Amino acid sequence: MVCPRFETKDDVYCFSLAKALYYVSSPVTVGFYAPWGRRKDVLLNKIEKYLCWESWKKEQDEVARTTQETRKCTGKDLIKLILYMIFYHPVITEKHKERENIRFIFIRFSAWEYAGSDQLWAGIVTTLCDGIEKYFGLAPISVYRAVARKTKIIDAPLKQEWVSKKFLCIPLWIAIILVILIGIGVGTLFIIYGFPFGSPTGDMMAAAEGVGATVVGISAAGILRVAVMTIKNTIITQKGVVQQKMNRTDMSSQLGFMSDVKREVKVITRYLQVMEVFQRQKIKVVLEITNLDKCMPNKVVGVLNAMNILLSDPSAPFISILAVDPRIIVECVESSLLLKGMANNGYLFLNRIITLPFCIPKMDSTTKCNLMKNIVEGKGELIRETEEENITDLAEVPNEKVQLLRQRVPHQNDLAVQDLPLNVGWSGELMQSSNFLADKGPHTKTLIDDAFRYLFNDVMKDYITDNVVHIRRIVNTITVTIRLMIRDVPRTEIRPHKVTEWVLLATQWPCRLSWILQCIEDEQQKRGLDQTDATGESSIYTRTFLWDVFEKSLEELDAIKTNLKQLLELDGDPEIFHKLLYGNFTVADANFFLPFTVNLDQSIKRQMELLRGSNNLWESKKNNRLTMLTLLNMTIDEVCKEMTKLCFREDNFQMYVQKIKEHNLNGRALVYSDNNEIKDVLCMGLGDWTLFSVYFLGVLPPPPAAPTTAPAFGKQEAQKLGVGSNDKLLKQSKMSLFISDEDLS
């Protein structure tokens, strides 16, 4: 085997973990922690490769040291193995303990495939049994299960690795030979003398024949039993036995099922010890549990319990690798009804199971580049196959109607357009599309290549996520977006680097981008309905940067962030979002790219629309007062305009308007100011202040006072209970201007 080369940091981390797993004492449970989409399967393959390389290297050293080759499970070695199992006990000698060559058996268990089973954790055992049988073959384990009760694992400081089984204080193999000889002798006597009766000599001969036949019969019965058990184990495998017990509802609901399954695991453990002695190497089973974070909470807890109970035998040579997203597993543990009151803290429960935590670090720039290169090269064939450059014939780029017609006439794929009937009604449309595609400008492949090339630019390395699924989405979406744009936009106006950045925004920050687009839509609708809005102001608004739109509406987003908690969790790093968006895209750019934004879920924007528009209007109409979201965006003139709805006296109204303008009390100032200070500044009386505070500030009337005639409470007791208290019923909340994942918790 070739010495491994470290091309990325992932290779270094995986090699370090593989090196540690080679020398760690089993059993051990590794927490292979990585967020969703972090290539856990690919990294597990790297770990397997490095473990195999280390095993091969140690095996070469061991063979050079002891001059003993390792045995296989085929050919003559298979016959020798079966004979050893039948006639000998294996011995764990000091020489065997000093061996450093280890053979690893990799078994990958995808929990998602067994999610429909009532006992998901039992799927681990069936997968384990099936993997062991496939690795060593069906014959050795079938024979061992037939003779397992008579086979002992001896741990003693002996020189020989096999000790013969005893029968009547003589080695079993000698006893079998004697039985065979006795059988041959008795058969010979039967043939020569027959069944003599009626004489002393004949009686002695009959007795000898009877004793011999009895011995041969008992031995034959034992041999026949072993043969029948071996055939049965060959037909009904260990995996089949567990599945039969698992399918019996009366058995699976009893504690005896767990005991039976645990007994099967112990059989596997003892069988592996026998194989270690025979093959002259140590054996460890690497059980890789994946896709557990896709299962239901109770299923997750069942698998964790199985790992904790079944695979924790001190002599079990198991290395369990739990490749999961710890955040999801913790939430499943805490929400599971099976652990209610036992595991309120999911992290503590997970720490009791995991003996070696290994958190995969973020992907470095080199790894990202290599990954994107592989993905882009994989898409290259698709690009070349559908390349549309050098279009000279109309039939080379058929529209949907041409393709449909060709599907209906499969034997005329080379049919030219001029050969088609003229009354089909699509020739004009086809000619128009062809003339547009023949427009001068970069070819489609050139535009796509430029967009992909920009992904590898140094300025983009901070924006590319380390989520493999997101990277694939970005690469695929860039191709689709450009191909959509060339149908409606002149090729000279397509900027590949802008397309790449816009696809990144929609892929990694769908919630924030949807919020910005909804704010733009609402503002444009408002300007379109406002007849006093000049065309120049609308033109100025289209030059507004998207970050300015987002920053202006940030307080609204903060006020409703509890309703958008799950959507905000879809977004990436807020600081990276600011860095990519600030001074980059304008409202005009958003309107330009919106028809081609296929990777942005429109249902997210719909929720923004309901929260920002319809719900606010309904609440305002229901309560006859302004909502906080509406008040935040109001200017001084809009506040004064709304005050006309409260029907103040004219002289008081003019004074209030003057005070509002004098103290610059716009909507934001009213939200964040203290109510008593606002009242003092406006110099309002009780009646006017009540109308103003209810409509603008949302101050609700106090609840009915508790009865003061209750004899059970005195004045001091009433004060302790808050009866008759005039404390403020509504406290203003301070809203954070920075919305991140930490704010949602």
Image (cartoon, rainbow, N blue to C red):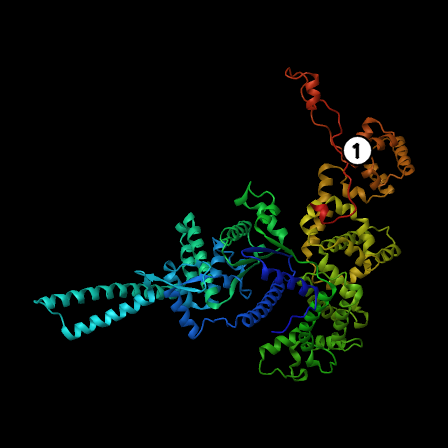
Q: Position of residue 36 (x, y in %)?
A: 64, 57
494 or 510: nearer the eye? 510
Q: Residue furthest left?
A: 198
- Looking at the image, residue 628 lies above or below residue 137: above
462 or 152: nearer the eye? 152
Callout 1 amino acid: Ser
> How many numbered marks appear?
1
- Looking at the image, residue 83 lies above or below residue 155: below
Q: Is residue 415 left or right of residue 634?
A: left
- Looking at the image, residue 164 lies above or below residue 377: above
Q: Quadrant of the C terminus?
A: top right
193 or 242: nearer the eye? 193
Q: Position of residue 20 (x, y in %)?
A: 62, 60
Q: Which residue is mark 1?
A: 693
Q: Is residue 548 visible?
A: yes
* Residue 17, image quadrant: bottom right
For label 1, count other residues whose C-alpha is less than 10 Å away and answer few (under 14), some (14-19) or many (20+).
Answer: some
Q: Residue at x 76, y 70 (%)?
A: 453
Q: Quadrant of the N terminus?
A: bottom right
Q: Position of residue 168 (x, y in %)?
A: 30, 60
Q: Position of residue 99 (x, y in %)?
A: 53, 64
Q: Residue at x 85, y 33 (%)?
A: 678
Q: Is residue 609 left or right of residue 347?
A: right
Q: Secondary structure at mark 1?
A: helix
Q: Residue at x 75, y 27 (%)?
A: 727
Q: Is residue 614 visible?
A: no
23 or 535: nearer the eye? 23
Q: Is residue 734 left or right of residue 30?
A: right
- Looking at the image, residue 351 lies above or below residue 41: above
